[in-house]
Structures are given as C-alpha cells and as structure tokens.
Amino acid sequence: MTTTSTVRLNLLRNPGDPQRDRLPGDRLELLTALIAAPSFDPLLRPHLVRFPPDHPTYRWMCVVAGCERPNEQTSNFNHCWEHGRLWRQARAAGTGRAEFLLTAQPLTAAGYVGQVPCRICLVRPARSNGHRLCHRHYNRWRHWSPKHPEVTLEQWLVDQAAFDGYGDCQAAACPDLAWSPLRLCRWHEGAYGRAGRPGGMAIPARWFRYFESCGRPVPISCVDRAAFREWCRRAPVEPVPGQANLLGLHPLVAAEIRWGLFRHQDGARSTWPLAWVQALANACLQAQVTTLVDLELADCVPYARTVAREILDELRLVYFTVEDTREAGFIETDHFGVRFRRNTSHFSLTAIPQRWLRDLCWDAMAALLRSPKCPQRGPFDRMRRACVELGAFLAGDAPEGGHDPTLLRAGHMDRFVADYRRRERDRLPSPALIRSDGTPALVTAGTRADVLDALRRLLTNAWNQGRLEQIRLDREFAVAVPATGARGGRVRRPFPDHVAKAVADPANLDRLDALDTDDRGLRDVWETLVATGRRCGEVIGLKLECVEVHHGLPLLWHDQTKIGHYDEAIRIPQSVHARLEERRRKTLAAFVQRHGRHPSVDERAGLALFPTPIRNPFGTKPLDYSWFYRAFRIWMDGLHLGGFVAHQARHTLATALLRHGAGLSHIRRYLGHVSERMTERYAKIALSEIEDVLQHVWVTGPGSPIPGQALSTGIEPMDRARAEALAVDLARRSTPAEGGFCTFQPVVQGHRCPWNLDCHNCDKFVLSGADLLYWRRKREQWRAIAERAPDDATADYLHQVFAPTGRAIDGLEKALAALGLLDDALSLDMRRPQDFFNRVWSTSFPAADLATDHDNSQKVPE
C-alpha cells in the first residue's frame, strides 16, 4: 500500500520528466539564488554552520546563567546533563524552576566544542582537554613533571619542539586533524572499528612505542583500499554541539538543508536539536543522494525523518509554481497565502485517476483559496473525496476507465449514484478510501450526502464557467447528480434530564478530572462548554487573556472561526470565570517553570490557555480536539449513559435559553450562528413551546371597552410536558376563532354563539401573541381601503371604525415587546384557525373530552 508520505515524496521526484538529468541543476540554481538573497541568514551559508550558544531557534548551551556546558538536546528545559539531574531533584522536592535557575551554580566546560589542536604542534589534535597537548607531548609531560615538580607546565612548554602531524582526516566530511598514521580523526577511528573495518586498513597495535618514538615509519596494511575509500566517502560525521556539518554532501542536498534550517526559524516551530539535523546530514551522506527528495526516509532514524519531512514541505513550495502543482496533481495552500489550522500546506489529488476530473477539482479548490472568505478545510476534504470516489467508480465502469470525458453520459453518473446509495444502505465499504488504520471506510448517510453535494456543486460551477464545454463533457452527465444530498441520520438533541444531571454531578466531574493526569484542563474545558454553549474548538483554542471583568461583569473573549467572527465577547457565570482564572494561573506557572521567567506583554498575547505539550516550545499552540474527544469518550463510557457527545451541550443551552424567553435572534447572536435557520436546528424542540407561550399572551379585542389591555401578566419557564398540558387547558376554557380566541364559556362548551359569530365586535374575544401577524395584515388592508376612499369623510370614517382594532394591536405589540417575544411573534405565521386546531388534535384528546365542562369556574387567565 502506498503511504501518504511516499506520495508526497514522489510528487517532488517527477519521474516522468523528460529533462530529469538537468532537474537537480535547475533546483540548485534556484536555491543558490535564494540563499544568496539579502533576506537569507548569512549564518547558514558556510559548510560548517556554527550557531551562537543562545540562538533563538537552535540554542545549544545550558540555560543556567554562566554555565559553559552544552544542553542535553533531548529535554525541553535546555539544561546540561548535570543541571538536568539537579533540576529533576529540585522539582521532586517542590522547587519552582524560576527559583532553581536563580540558585543554580554555573559549571565550567567539561570539554571543548569540536577538536582542539595541540598548542605546541598545532597540526596534531589535543589528547587532554585540560592540558591541550597531543598524545606525544602529553606522555612526555606526564613522565617529566614528577621528576621536576618545581617547573610549571608553561615553563616546560618553552623548550618543547613541535612534531609533524598526520594530515587531515580521510573521512570526506570531516574537518578535523588525523589522530594517528591511519589518517583518521579520533572519532572516525572508533566509527571505523564499529563498522567492521571495511577494506581492512590497519596499523600495528603498539605503533607509537616501536615505530614513531624510534623515528621509524609506521607500516600500514590494507586488504581493499577501494573499499576503505568508499567507507571514507560515506562515513558519518560526529555530532558536535553548536555545529551542523554539511561537508561531503552533494551541493544540492547541502542547499536544501540550509533552506530548511532558514525556513524553520520563521514562526512558532518545534524545537530542532542540532543532533537531529546532523543525523539527517549523515543519512544523506551514507546514502550518497544527490537531492533530499531521493532519500528513503524509512531507513532514517525517527528524528531525522521529522526534520526531513518539514524540509521537503518547504522545498515543494520552492520547486513548484502554482501552475506546476496543477500539472503534478496537488495543490499548495501556502501558494495562496492560506494555511489550515493543524495542517500542512500540501493537499494531494493524485488519488483521482482521471486527469480531467483532477483538473476540475484543482480549479475548484484554487477558486476557493482565492475567494475573499476562504472556507475551512472541510469543503476541500469533501470535494477531494467526492472526486476520488467518482474516479474510482468510473475507472471500473466507464469506457476507457473514464479518462475520455467525451464518452461519459448521464447513465454513468446514474450508476455511480445507485452504487453509492446501495453501499450506504448495506453498510458497504468505500470503493476508494481507507481509514488511517488501513481498514476500508464505510459509506454512511453523512458521507453519501457529502459526496453527492460536493459533486453537484463542483460540476454545476464548472458548467456555469464553461469548463464542461472546454473538455467536451456531456452536460447531462453533470446534471445527473441528484440534488437530494441532504444528510441522513439524527439531528443532535439536547441532553435528557438524567444525562444533564449525570454530566454535571460533582462526583462524576471528579472522575473526569482524574482522567486528566497531566492537568491540561480537561474539566475546565467541559464546564466551560456546558455553561457557555461554545463550540469545542472555540474553548480549546482560548487565549491566555480570554477572561476579563467589565463594570463588574465577567466576560469571555473568544474566536468564532467557523463563521469568521473574531474576538467576540459573551457574559459568563462567576464560577466559570473563577475556573478559567485558575487555569490561567497554572498556564503561566508552566511557562515560568519551562523558561525560568515570566512572559512579556507580547508573549502573553499569543499564549494559549490550554497549550499542548507537543512541539510547542513557546506555548502558543492549543491542545487538539482529539485529546478532548478521547478523554470525554472514556468518561461517558464509564458513566454508561449512551452515545452522547459533547456538542449536545450546545443544543441543551439553546433550548434552555428559548424556554426562558430568549428570542431566536438573541440565541443566534449568543451562540454565534450565521442565520436563525441554524439556530432553529439547535432549538428545534422548543419551537412548539414558544408558540404555546405566545398563545398565553392575551390582550382584549377590538370589541372590549379598553382594546389592547393585557390580560396575561407573566410567563413562567416550563418544560415540554407542561407546555402541552397548558395548550390543552387553554383549549378547554377558550375556543379558537379567526384572529384570536373566544372566551365565552357556553361557546367554549360547544353551545351556539348568541351573537352570530361576530367575534371582532364582541368583548369576549381576545387577541393572542400568535395572531399578531394576522392583525398586522388586517391593519394594512384597512389602511389601503381608506386610502382609496372617494373623499376625506369616508376615509376618516374608516379610520374611526378600525381605531379600536389598532389600539388592540398596539397593546398586543407592547405586551410582547415587554416579554421579549415580539420578534418571535412576527416570525410565527398562523393565518388560519386550522393551524391551531391541528395542534390541539395532535395532543390525542378526543373532541368529546375537550367539549366536556371540566371546570366551569375557570376564567380568562389573569
């Protein structure tokens, strides 16, 4: 099976390029021009790249002030080995890192960075770091100093003569001096022995005593000199603190690594110890590759693969233009200035078999990336999946594998749709896609909707832009995609009462807290979700400065990235504010513990409230949603509540807001929805309740002495069962009429109306909030009649006739506005009495029961 990383590497290789032989030269010329640019860091241009000890990206010295030892390169705290050991002991004793760094004593250098020459010979390497003498001079001093204790080393050095050196190390990438007549440095002599001594190059065991000290030439034996030279050409380089050795590499490989080191300095990147970079250079040296693209990453150590993949991602942006990516079958979002969160720039389309379909997909993605409001990654994933699924089907069903668009007809699309629906119905695997674990991805109602909707949108846009005519694709093939691509399955429901109590129970919340072994804020995220109804990604992505108090009111500042609203504020409960303040204190303490100082003002602005511990040296990256999802799933499974998800807390809050009298427009603004239609999906259960509430807002009708007088003084929050019960109770003591309700009890009980159904002039007739739109239309109708009156007297008369009705409408609007329900009343259109009758009959009460005089003493609600 071809992996994603292999495909991404193959895209750089261009195996079908007829000018393959000159491709490395072109790329080297391009990188050379970039490296020579003034914006490139001149520190990275030499073959031996030496970094300052406190380099902001590639720091290699211990962080303890004055310490001369390199850091461990494997710890996030940048301590040397000794200070790392002391820090672990201090942390176990409860000492903070800031206090530790203030009290830690600096250490002198235990060794030199790289090789140090003998200070007498200058052409031989020093054996002792303390004396800085070569092996021969060190032995002389060691035997002479006990016999002359009164002579110091400096005095002894004056009379010493220099010896000839052995030349440079024969390893191609080694800049050091040779250690022995074998002409290898000390480190490469050890590496040569560990490699099995290829070529059999050797010198006598006691060569110094029997040969060099006697002035005799040292004999060197060799079985296969060519094999030895080959080993020298591929020999790895010793990792030296503060140095990246690019000697011996092909010029293009060295330029590629330089460019990767330069690009890694931009933005908040993961920490690259220089030992990782050297491991990658050694892998290229041993494989003798001419470009980093040809390196087999599977043969490299894991941390070298990490560095190589990031460099290759950066090289792809250099080696390919926007037009080149279309030809190669992928798209780079960085070419358009877009980078999706937690994703690389690369977006491969090579899984689409047909070139014409792949080009349509590329063009559609490029148009989205160039749009003023580029969407998130979801539409891109759905579009690619749709094209991959269609392409896989056409490859086995259409003539010539679907590669010739002129041969495709509507029947091919019909068969694809039928096959995909059958896979959905029978829970069959996808014909083309697999999961990350290697198992086939099943076709569900959601994936079916995504695929069909994305295909229809893609082909429709291509048709409107004239692309179908250019590739001569039959129009009937494009329009054959059905428009009924709505998602199947259930809409998310609010939590039932027993689930809502369970997920808010303190004992259960303690169990959730116990799952957060590293104290990353799992319970804080969940309680904030429940209290605020935010999206999970909005809470996890909160910044450190997300909570503030304005005029005594705690506010939460967050980004609603899904709809493009940034830095939005909502009121939050005091308990949530206190919990987030405590989390902020812990996050700051973690920053101080890692860096030994408090963050600056600019650093605080970029810090995440819930920072991830992975590849996040500066604390700016938040935790991933998968971290929360896994822990939440374990918690819910332990509570044995069923398959509920965290997002249902958002639906629960929307329903609760609506039950307490909030209008849809208010809920939309609070939850951050793009439209009230989306809000209705979240508050769907409560829509019928708001109708019941509106029907309990009564004012006197036009025939009463005081039209528009409110008869309802308040509305209490109620659940669905009580709302339905009140609706039935309302039907018992009143009966629906045109534009309102009749409260005359004999009529309610089923008797004949004594006023011949003249409801609008009857004082027993009342208007409800559900009828506001009906009466507004009536008022417009009367005004239109009055405007067409033949004279002013007739117009004045008509206005006087309708004046009581106008006062009743004004009173109803005033009552609804006082309760915050005016917008809801205007959005509820009950134009016919049957609209209410149908709701009454749906409560399953027989008509005879509704006509029974259950309580003759009941009156109009006060």
Image (cartoon, rainbow, N blue to C red):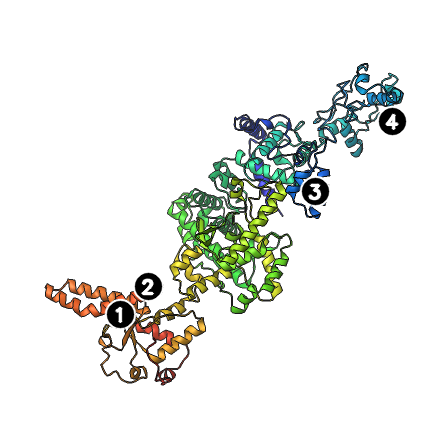
Tell me the CA gap for discs 4 and 1.
115 Å
Which quarter of the image is occupied by the C terminus?
bottom left
Q: Nearer the viewer, mark 4 or mark 2?
A: 2
Dot 1 surroundings within 10 Å: few (below 14), some, or many (20 or more)?
Answer: many
Closer to the camera: disc 4 or disc 1?
1
Q: Position of residue 595 (x, y in %)?
A: 62, 40
Q: Are marks 4 and 3 in contact (CB under 8 Å)?
A: no
Which residue corresponds to mark 1? 708
Q: Is residue 612 left or right of residue 198?
A: left
Q: Name the secondary structure under disc 1.
A: loop
Label whose residue precedes the other's in the sequence (4 or 3) = 3
Q: Amino acid at mark 1?
A: Gly
Given the image, on which type of amino acid does mark 2 rest? Ala
User: Residue 165: x and y, percent?
Assistant: 78, 19
Query: How far apart are the alpha carbons under marks 1 and 3?
Result: 78 Å
Q: CA distance from mark 4 to mark 3?
A: 44 Å
Q: Earlier in the sequence, mark 2 or mark 1?
A: 1
Q: Classify 52 as above or below 488.
A: above
Q: State the residue position of label 4.
A: 205
From where the camera sits, is residue 16 visible? Answer: no
State the separation of the CA atoms marked 3 and 2.
Answer: 65 Å
Instruction: Kindly identify which residue carries mark 3.
Output: 87
Circle 4: residue type: Ala
Whether label 4 touches label 2, CB < 8 Å? no
Task: Work out how far the residue at label 4 is from the one at label 2, CA to CA, in angstroms.
Answer: 102 Å
Residue that carries the numbered disc 2 in the rendered image: 817
322 versus 563 height, above or below: above
Q: Earlier in the sequence, mark 1 or mark 3?
A: 3
Tag 4, which secondary structure?
A: loop
- Locate residue 558, reporting x and y percent: 48, 50
SS for callout 3: helix
